Amino acid sequence: MSDATPTVEEAIVAQARVHAREVADEIGVDLASVDWAVSARAKRRAGVCRYDHEREVATVVLSRRAYRSYDSGEFEAIVRHELVHAWEFQTHGESGHGSRFRERAAAVDAPRHCEPFSEPRYRLVCSDCGWEGKRHRASNPVKAPDQYRCGDCGGGYRVEHVESGRTWTTAGGYGAARAALGDDW
Ligand SMILES: [Zn+2]
Ligand SMILES: [Zn+2]
């Protein structure tokens, strides 16, 4: 037993493995032949799944940046997306984003696309240190940013609705932006 603090990479893989065990049966993926890795450099993609045809092992590579900028629900959705790829590789020897992929992804509530970095719906930004997180859903900090503080510096948050450019810092501001945007929300 070591009492060393786990590295960020170990923490990411540990969380991914825990979630993978919860969803493996539903996806149909064999976790015994899935390897895990973390990329510190991936900027655009939250995750990727590679397949070694000779060893018949799928490797899910998760981006450190995605882990940092997503909440755990969104991070887990990425894990499910990559595990659907792993399942496709294991059962069909290839994987893409075709109808077979989309059906299985929909069944386990995983996003259809690999690149959620490209278009988040909201940006959560620290007004003090500039930390930025991408959010695809209206999570609690998006709805009431004044109830939360930046994990890095303790500063206050501002939320931006990416498509319209509207920003708010309070629950009231969120409600007003929603009302103003109406159908364009
Ligand atoms: Zn994908
Ligand atoms: Zn900050």
Image (spheres, rainbow, N blue to C red):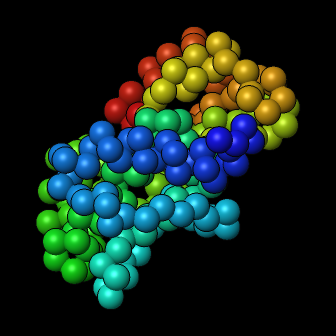
Quarter of the figure that contains the C terminus: top left
**Residue at 36% of width from left, 60% of height from top?**
82
Image coords of residue 36 (percent x, y): 48, 61
User: Which quadrant of the structure image shows residue 141?
Assistant: top right
Q: Closest to the observer: 166 or 33?
A: 33
Q: Closest to the observer: 127 or 36?
A: 36
Residue 127 as seen in the image, left or right of residue 15: right
Image coords of residue 106 (percent x, y): 20, 49
**Residue at 46% of width from left, 47% of height from top?**
16
Residue 153 as seen in the image, left or right of residue 180: right
**Residue at 67% of width from left, 67% of height from top?**
41
Image coords of residue 175 (percent x, y): 50, 16
Q: Residue furthest front?
A: 1
Quarter of the figure that contains the N terminus: top right
Q: Residue furthest bottom?
A: 54
Say whether residue 44 is visible.
yes
Say whether residue 106 is visible.
no
The number of numbered badges drawn on the structure is 0
